[in-house]
Amino acid sequence: MRKTTISCTTCKNRHCFIKQCSPEWINIIDDNKNQNNYKKGEHIIREGNPVQGIYFIHTGKVKVITTGLNGKHQIVRLANDGHILGHKGFEGDVYPIGAIAMDDSLICFVENETLDDMFMSNPKFTYTLMMFYSHELRKLEQRIKNIAQMNTREKVAEALLYLIEIFGLDEHQELNTLLSREDIAAIAGTNAEQIIRQLTIFENEKIIAKKGKKIIILKQEELNKIIRKVNLHPEIRS
Amino acid sequence: MRKTTISCTTCKNRHCFIKQCSPEWINIIDDNKNQNNYKKGEHIIREGNPVQGIYFIHTGKVKVITTGLNGKHQIVRLANDGHILGHKGFEGDVYPIGAIAMDDSLICFVENETLDDMFMSNPKFTYTLMMFYSHELRKLEQRIKNIAQMNTREKVAEALLYLIEIFGLDEHQELNTLLSREDIAAIAGTNAEQIIRQLTIFENEKIIAKKGKKIIILKQEELNKIIRKVNLHPEIRS
DNA sequence: CGTGCTTTTGAATAGTATCAAGGCCGGTGG
DNA sequence: CCACCGGCCTTGATACTATTCAAAAGCACG
């Protein structure tokens, strides 16, 4: 973690919610924010620490985890540029989640006191954040259904699609991120062995290819089918 | 579904978010809202219908479902007095979830156009809604972890605790709601047979008692233990 | 007093987690 | 440059758990 100083007034991140504030407020935030560079693997938030504000991701990739059964980690959410970490709403409480940088990440921090003033004076900012939460909620509701009902094959397909959605593919159809099998298992809600077996099956079916640890997506539509098949049952919809 | 007319100015629901608006706005909402009584089992929202606004639960019990694998229903959330249905943020889209009354329920509906004006003119309303979403998000994140990692025993314990949290127990320690085994299965993310088997086990362990379809909670702390044991591993926390 | 629905139980089957062992790869030090 | 080490990946065998199917019992309702 190393302190840096990119001003909000020159910041090029178009998705940052702070941009929803008025120009004079952006200046105030500029003076009050803390900006740090986190190295790959570094903790941004530790589970159980007191909540002091919200983290805004300028650039980077972050995994949000909670510790569960037998100390197993579950990846609850993946976040990148423009996303936030540490939801508003539990001052005096502790973070129920931890956040770890998956790549070197530049992250701005705004403390609770400043945030409260921002909400009061910038309705558009509050509104945008409300919409963000609303969307996240909707996504999680879908994910709950998936994780609860899917078998391993479907879970792995869903995890891959989730990774594509968040981080995207490069020009060679390669996943723009390098996760351990264990990390993928923590997204899908199973263990590393199951992930490997299923990836091998997908490889045999020519849906993906493996290049070392990297995963190349050959037929994304096939992954979609595995999930869609699950979602669309028009004959059942009343 | 039958139209009723309780004015917001005399409404006694303390949790309703509309109360966060200014008095003049409450009058405007009063003129623009639609209030209906839904009978037990009636659909409030149908999966796939266009989104037109937000539903505010005055009184009642509602299950929020999505249709998944092989047409199985997953109960994503349970809602009661003061909660809302149909998240803001997908105008022009269709509801990804359905909502069904579990008891006779009185529900107010406000359409998108009115809502947008409310957000613009009532920052406190927007802020309150943002906080609500933030809390819901946090709860769902915990639930995701649970559902993904728990075995049947733990899932059933969690489902029972969830029911207690939302609907509470009456003076005889009876669950304040009557769900089918299938409904409980749709919360826990398994099937009705597993629920029955596990309820029988809990009964033998004197953790619960069954009175017909009703469930009596004898030792809630034992249910907590089953879940807590899962959450607390201090030796592992870094 | 049937009829249909939900609950309950049992048995067979399929699926998943766990354990163990070997392979691969990158990094380190000789 | 090579040999070794440790970590992650991979695969197989096994034990366990959950799902499915089938059938009986209980219950509500007309």
Image (spheres, coloured by chain):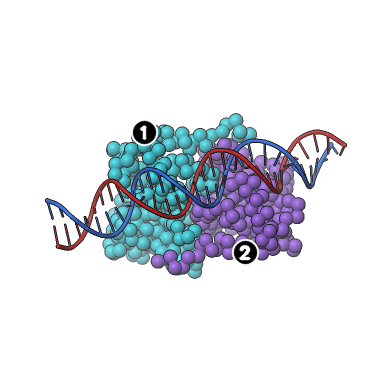
Chain colours: A cyan, B purple, C red, D blue
> Which is more toward the observer, A230 or B153?
B153
Query: Residue under mark 1: which chain is it in?
Result: A
Image location of residue A66, percent across then percent down = 46, 58
Q: Check disc 2 and report its element: helix, strand or loop.
A: helix
Kindly indicate whether the residues beneath marks 2 and 1 are on one polypeptide chain.
no
Residue B33 visible to an observer of this rendering: no
Q: Which residue does the image show at 50% across and 53% down from the upper left?
A: B149
Q: For mark 1, what is the residue?
A: A206
Disc 2 residue type? Glu
Q: Which residue does the image show at 71% across and 51% down from the upper left?
A: B178
D22 lies above or below B195 = above
A161 lies above or below A44 = above
Image marks 2 and 1: residues in contact by CB distance under 8 Å? no
Q: Is residue B27 left or right of residue A126?
A: right
Q: For mark 2, what is the residue?
A: B222
Q: How many marks?
A: 2
For residue C5, which quarter of the picture?
top right
Pointer 2 local density, CA inside 10 Å: few below 14, some 14–19, many at least 20: some
- Quadrant containing the C terminus of chain A in the rendered view: top right
Disc 1 residue type? Lys
Query: Residue under mark 2: which chain is it in?
Result: B
Q: Is residue B100 left or right of residue A53?
A: right
Pointer 1 local density, CA inside 10 Å: few below 14, some 14–19, many at least 20: few
Residue A104 visible to an observer of this rendering: yes
Image location of residue A18, percent across then percent down = 39, 55
> Which is more toward the observer, B170 or B211?
B211
